[in-house]
Image (cartoon, rainbow, N blue to C red):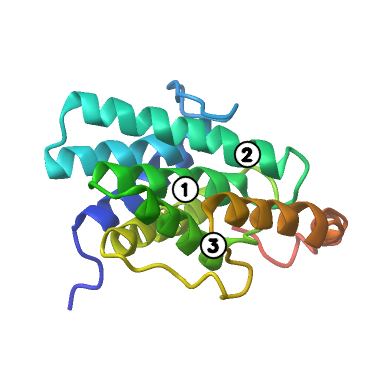
Amino acid sequence: GRMWGNGLIERIAAEVAAAAEARLEGCPYAAMSSAGSGSKGIAVILPVFETAKEIGASQSSLLHALAFGHLLNEYINSKIGKLAPVCTCAIASCTAAGAAVTWLMGGTDRQIGFAIRNMTGNITGMLCDGGKTGCALKLATASYAAMLSALLAVSDVGLRPTDGICADTPEDCIANIARIGAEGMGHMDKVILSIMKNKNLGAEKI
């Protein structure tokens, strides 16, 4: 049977992955940056754009949602900082996309908070082990999670504030994400670099 559908979520995951792969392989087309990164721009813009197209949103609503997504992306990235060894393309940009998609689908402020909380309790901790073509897979996973978080949120489904690192407010959720990245994973870069330096590259040739 068919194992992969052609619904909105699958299309977004595939498009984000394809755009990220093309960019990281050196495709000579411009990508709009968000919070200083082209991959982050892809992660914020494509889910919002595709959702707007799917639901027949007005140009004004699309632009509002994109502006919100970019601003939230900048906010989350600023809280995590530049040196944390977490994948901010996934954790910050896809969370911003999920929140913007929630707004686009008519979500209330409370539901937008649910989307952010759902992402907090789901993919926080995804590693950054350098920019490379394989990042496309991380962004496919994170985009899928963002859309799932948004769809749950507009149905009034949010993880509980008592769950793990989740918190009551979106601001506190983001603060906890930042703390995991900066404080909790403080030694992660050394471990990642050690793994990369000690690989037996002759063992596997692709």
Residue beneath label 3, please? 168
The nearer-to-camera label among 3 and 2 is: 3
Mark 3 crowd level (few <14, some 14–19, many ≥20, 10 Å Cα):
some
> How far, Cα to Cα, is label 3 from label 2?
20 Å
Placement of 30 over or under 84, stated as above or below: above
Query: Tag 3 or tag 1, which sits nearer the N-term?
Result: 1
Q: Observer-nearest residue: 166 or 2?
A: 166
Q: Secondary structure at mark 1?
A: helix
Rendered view: 27 above or below 148: above
Q: Residue at x 17, y 78 (%)?
A: 1
Q: Residue at x 87, y 59 (%)?
A: 187
Q: Amino acid at mark 3?
A: Asp
Crowd band around label 2 with a 10 angstrom C-alpha radius: few (<14), some (14–19), many (20+): many
Residue 189 image point, x, y percent: 82, 53
In primary-sequence order, the first of circles 1 and 2 is 2
Between 110 and 74, the one lying in front of the other is 110
Tag on residue 77? 2
